[in-house]
Image (cartoon, helix red, strand yellow):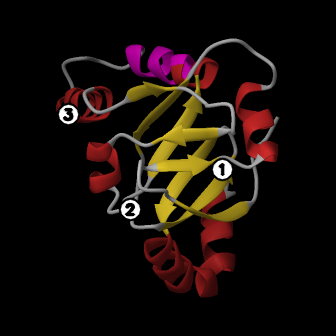
Amino acid sequence: MLLTGAFSRSLDEKLRVAIPKRLRDGLDGGRPGGLYIAPGTDQSLALYCEETFTRLADRLSQTSPTRQDVRAFTRLFYARAQRVELDAQGRVRIPPELAELARLGREVVLLGVQDRVEIWAAQQWASYLADRQEHYDEIAETALQG
């Protein structure tokens, strides 16, 4: 199931955020296994189901471990990635060091992005959107060239 949509949420004092049912269903799809939260791009965090996280690991294992960029990425990514669980209320707790890395405040935005959920500080997302939305057509043209 493709994950889509943007959802404004608040972090509570324990750094928990409620994942909307539509995103939860797309993340786990009834499959057993946990979720993984890891550094994302553009100062966000990424929340993956175990299957997607494993596919990413498999893809990375196909690259040369002697390449400097591969070594750096795998160290920075896996050293900070953590397994998390959904609680009975559909929330995940964001590890403090990852919340700090993404500069999360009380207000966050959850984005369904194909096979993962991105977690953004609300102000960071608003800034990103403002900077890029007016260039949507050019971004689409470049991204969809094939």
Residue at image position (61%, 57%) is 110
Element marked by disc 3: helix
Horizontal and vertical percent for residue 142?
60, 64
Instruction: In the rendered structure, find residue 104 and report the number of the disc placed on it.
Output: 2
Looking at the picture, does residue 30 appear above or below residue 41? above
Q: Is residue 16 magenta?
A: no
Q: Which sits in the foreground, 131 or 37? A: 37
Q: Which sits in the foreground, 146 or 43? A: 43
Say whether disc 1 or disc 3 marks the residue closer to the N-terminus: 3
The segment highlighted magenta reads: 54-61
Element marked by disc 1: strand
Say whether disc 2 or disc 1 marks the residue closer to the N-terminus: 2
What distance separates the C-alpha of mark 1 from that of mark 3?
24 Å
Instruction: In the rendered structure, find residue 90 and report the number of the disc placed on it.
Output: none
Q: Are marks 2 and 1 in contact (CB under 8 Å)?
A: no
Looking at the picture, does residue 7 appear above or below residue 68? below
Which quadrant would residue 85 be assigned to in this image? top right
| Disc 3 residue crowd, few under 14, some 14–19, many 20+, Cα 10 Å | few
What distance separates the C-alpha of mark 2 from that of mark 3?
24 Å
- Residue bearing the label numbered 1: 113
Horizontal and vertical percent for residue 135?
60, 82
- Residue bearing the label numbered 3: 72
Q: Is residue 4 left or right of residue 37?
A: right
